[in-house]
Image (cartoon, rainbow, N blue to C red):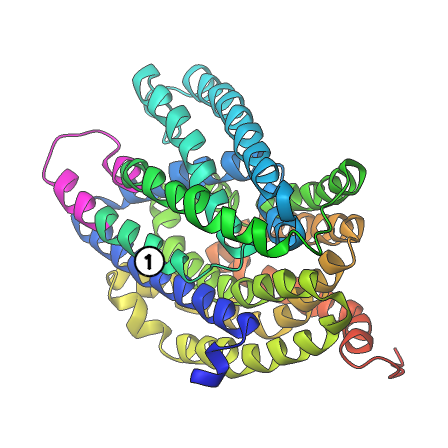
């Protein structure tokens, strides 16, 4: 283990995996407590509002997060300027985007609708979205600066405070208690983490990488972000927007039953993303070793993520029982299907990593458009006949199809010179 952690690729990968597990653990505890202290409708509404905030924040970040992971490792003396630009642009766009959405939610929906927003809540939503954008980008900055070990500490503190606040607001008459407890702790963590980044980590990184720095030109950065952002827009339709769609198709109660399956599936997906994010950062530092790093990462995905998916699928009824009998009855098959889809998803994740290292983000845009269109369209088409489990079937079919199409390219990357017959 000491030898493993001495390698930056593995050390940062394990730190990001630990962060995912910490987030997932506190996330599950949070929604378990919420399920037992709030009504199903309040849980479903809170989840939809949080998902809406995450959707707006992600879309208005222009995918600066992935750009920081890709280009900060060799940005050298331009690192501070790159990070400051990401913060400023994302915050400004978050304010504009969230304000527009809140105006729409206030005017378009009646007061009884789950997505209706009063003007007071709308203001809180706008501020929370802007702050969340910085909170999210600082994790990408730490990853790109190869200091990911700070991320699980930061998010562990966030998870604890968030859970404590949930219990507090559950015993008050505060409106939007779920959303408030989710967003308020972010404000307390923003200042100390960014002081750590700008006063300690960033100056050291700039000095260490100044000799062989290779910062992206404006053209390269713009081209990379344009393709990656386009793909991210479609990806969000397939993930963050999904809880909102479920509430609209099935109602707030089934939106609550969808929540634990969504949370556990997101955890396994984020485990893969954690490992491949470290691969992007290290591959950017030494591009000639990218395929060797990728093989090492793939072995660790097979040894960690896939066994975890099997365990969750087998334990699905008992895990969902923690939320309540209604959750177990409505979500068991859905969760199991989502866990099975983790296997073909590995191939897709490796292809996405390969494309990012090669700056071929236009290919990602096409891939994620197909993925999102199939998921959203398939869910809407099957909702009436299959119900909530339609999401699981559609995800599984889409991931298998994409793995079959992209598998040859991934194999040629991992083993150069090997011929693959389709």
Residue drawn at (46%, 40%) of the image: 54
Q: Quadrant of residue 351?
A: bottom right
Question: What secondary structure is the stretch in magenta mostly built from?
Answer: helix
Query: Where 303 sits versus 8, above or below?
Result: below
- Disc 1 residue crowd, few under 14, some 14–19, many 20+, Cα 10 Å: some
Q: Position of residue 104 (x, y in %)?
A: 49, 19
Bounds of the magenta segment: 163-182
Label 1 SS:
helix
Q: Examine the rendering and report whether any part of residue 247 can be seen.
A: no
Image location (x, y in percent) of residue 65? 57, 46
Instruction: Find out whether residue 419 is within the magenta segment.
Output: no
Residue in front for this viewpoint, 271 or 43: 271
Residue at 52% across / 83% down in the picture?
303
Residue closest to the eye, 333 or 130: 130
Frontmost residue, 44 versus 52: 52
Extreme residue toward the left, this view: 171
* Residue 325 visible in the picture: yes
Quarter of the image with the N terminus is: bottom left
Q: Position of residue 142 (x, y in %)?
A: 49, 53
**Is 170 covered by the magenta stretch?**
yes
Q: Position of residue 298 (x, y in %)?
A: 62, 78
The quarter of the rendered structure image containing the C terminus is bottom right
Rendered view: 40 above or below 412: above
Residue at the image point whose x is 44% and y is 63% from the top? 267
Left or right: 255 in relation to 237: left
Residue highlighted by disc 1: 153
**In this image, 297 relative to 203: left or right?**
right
* Picture residue at 32% right of the left edge, 22% below the top: 121
């Amino acid at each position: 283990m000491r030898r493993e952690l001495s390698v930056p690729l593995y050390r940062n990968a394990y730190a990001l995996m630990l962060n995912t597990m910490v987030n997932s653990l506190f996330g599950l505890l949070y929604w378990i407590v919420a399920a037992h202290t709030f009504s199903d409708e309040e849980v479903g509404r809170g989840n939809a509002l949080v998902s809406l905030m995450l959707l707006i924040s992600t879309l208005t970040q222009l995918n600066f997060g992935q750009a920081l992971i890709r280009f900060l490792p060799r940005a050298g003396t331009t690192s501070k300027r790159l990070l400051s630009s990401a913060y400023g642009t994302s915050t400004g766009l978050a304010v504009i985007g969230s304000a527009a959405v809140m105006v729409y939610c206030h005017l378009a929906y009646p007061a009884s609708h789950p997505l209706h927003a009063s003007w007071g809540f709308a203001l809180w939503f706008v501020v929370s979205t802007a702050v969340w954008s910085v909170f999210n980008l600082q994790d990408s900055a730490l990853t790109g600066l190869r200091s990911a070990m700070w991320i699980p500490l930061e998010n562990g503190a966030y998870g604890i405070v968030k859970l404590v606040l949930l219990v507090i607001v559950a015993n008050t008459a505060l409106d939007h208690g779920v959303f408030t407890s989710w967003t308020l702790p972010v404000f307390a963590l923003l200042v100390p983490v960014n002081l750590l980044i700008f006063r300690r980590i960033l100056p050291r990184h700039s000095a260490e990488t100044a000799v062989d720095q290779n910062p992206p030109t404006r053209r390269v950065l713009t081209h990379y972000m344009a393709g990656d952002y386009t793909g991210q827009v479609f990806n969000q339709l397939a993930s963050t927007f999904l809880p909102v769609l479920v509430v609209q198709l099935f109602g707030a109660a089934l939106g609550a039953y969808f929540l634990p399956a969504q949370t556990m599936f997101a955890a396994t997906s984020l485990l893969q993303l954690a490992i491949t994010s470290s691969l992007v950062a290290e591959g950017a530092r030494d591009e000639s070793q990218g395929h060797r790093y990728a093989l090492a990462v793939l072995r660790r995905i097979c040894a960690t993520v896939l066994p975890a998916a099997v365990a969750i699928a087998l334990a699905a009824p008992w895990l969902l029982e923690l939320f309540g009998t209604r959750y177990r009855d409505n979500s068991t098959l859905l969760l199991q299907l989502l866990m099975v889809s983790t296997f073909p998803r590995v191939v897709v994740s490796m292809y996405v990593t390969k494309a990012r290292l090669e700056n071929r983000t236009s290919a990602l845009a096409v891939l994620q458009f197909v993925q999102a269109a199939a998921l959203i369209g398939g869910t809407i088409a099957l909702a009436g006949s299959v119900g909530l489990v339609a999401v699981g079937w559609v995800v599984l079919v889409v991931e298998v199809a994409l793995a079959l199409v992209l598998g040859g390219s991934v194999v040629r990357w991992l083993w150069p010179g090997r011929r693959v017959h389709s």
